[in-house]
């Protein structure tokens, strides 16, 4: 089986299973108590585990109840005019073992949405999906994956709902994960509308990122895309929108903000990034 090697292993997250296990146990202990409910999807941040691993781990861990055939992974840094893509075969390496692609689901989805089908060697080496995969393999050890790149456009909503339709026709039990960070603020990112230092951090935390969180919690796919493009508060708005649309199509009745933080809180400076975790609960 053709295999995509992990490009960020040993830098963005631990290189081996023991190190990942230790981090996962620590992350789970940082929660504010267990959440009840049936969660069909979520949105996670994708920085290195030092910065946002705790939030991503607790979102994915909260989704782990029930039998799941496939985890649908929406991600990639894309522009509105980008062509969507799907990894349609092979497997992706993780410290806990390989995650196989569900080839029938992936190929059917690519055909339905007009996405470019890709092999492991050609699918982008992009942190948005890879940094989540050790969590996926840990919490869903028998599930397959379908990695999907989603542009921030109206197509995101369609891709989310079409994916649920494909899964239903194939008789597959799925859960969905959308991967995005929030405001990238400061001179490193060419975005400084709120000043600098603590004042800028306050503006991101209290004004800019809450707008995007509101759209995600509301499961409003079009508003999610609009927020990302207009206010630069979602770097992968397409992935987030597709996850919200898919979760809604799967019967999610509400979104829950699990947690929020920024890289400034660990490494204060003029440039920093916001991170939020969202869960979608079935009604």
Image (tube, grey):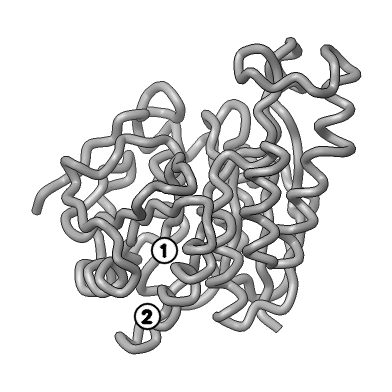
Image coords of residue 181 (percent x, y): 61, 39
Height in image: 168 above or below 17? below
Image coords of residue 238 (percent x, y): 53, 53
Q: Would you call the spot at circle 1 few (<14 residues within 10 Å), some (14-19), or many (20 or more)?
A: many
* Left or right of residue 74, residue 27 in this image: right
Q: Earlier in the sequence, mark 1 or mark 2?
A: 1
The residue located at (41%, 80%) in the rendering is: 173
Q: Which residue was labeled with disc 1? A: 72
Quarter occupied by residue 11:
top left
Do residues under tags 1 and 2 come within 8 Å of each other at their CB atoms? Answer: yes
* Left or right of residue 112, residue 247 in this image: right
Q: Secondary structure at mark 1?
A: strand
The residue located at (61%, 14%) in the rendering is: 188
Q: Residue furthest front?
A: 81
The numbered dot on residue 167 is 2
Instruction: Work out which quarter of the rendered image holds the C terminus and state it.
Output: bottom right
Image coords of residue 269 (percent x, y): 73, 10
Residues 117 and 262: in front is 117
């Amino acid at each position: 089986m053709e295999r995509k090697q992990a490009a960020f292993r040993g830098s963005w997250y631990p290189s081996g299973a023991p190190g990942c296990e230790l981090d996962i146990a620590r992350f789970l202990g940082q929660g504010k108590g267990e959440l009840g409910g049936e969660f069909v999807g979520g949105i996670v941040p994708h920085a290195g585990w030092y910065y946002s691993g705790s939030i991503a781990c607790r979102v994915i861990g909260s989704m782990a109840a029930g039998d799941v055939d496939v985890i649908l992974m929406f991600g990639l840094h894309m522009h509105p005019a980008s062509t969507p893509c799907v990894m349609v075969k092979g497997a992706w390496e993780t410290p806990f073992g390989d995650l196989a692609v569900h080839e029938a689901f992936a190929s059917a989805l690519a055909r339905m949405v007009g996405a470019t089908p890709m092999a492991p060697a050609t699918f982008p080496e992009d942190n948005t999906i890879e940094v989540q995969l050790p969590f996926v393999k840990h919490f869903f050890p028998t599930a397959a994956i379908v990695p999907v790149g989603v542009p921030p456009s109206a197509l995101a909503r369609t891709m989310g709902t079409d994916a649920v339709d494909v899964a239903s026709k194939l008789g597959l039990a799925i859960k969905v994960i959308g991967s995005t960070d929030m405001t990238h603020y400061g001179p490193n990112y060419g975005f400084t509308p709120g000043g600098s230092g603590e004042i800028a951090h306050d503006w991101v935390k209290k004004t800019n990122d809450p707008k995007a969180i509101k759209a995600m919690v509301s499961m409003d796919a079009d508003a999610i895309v609009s927020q990302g493009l207009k206010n630069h508060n979602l770097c992968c708005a397409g992935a987030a929108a597709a996850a919200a649309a898919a979760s809604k199509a799967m019967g999610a009745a509400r979104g829950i903000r699990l947690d929020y933080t920024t890289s400034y809180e660990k490494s204060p400076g003029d440039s920093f990034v916001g991170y939020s975790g969202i869960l979608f609960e079935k009604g």
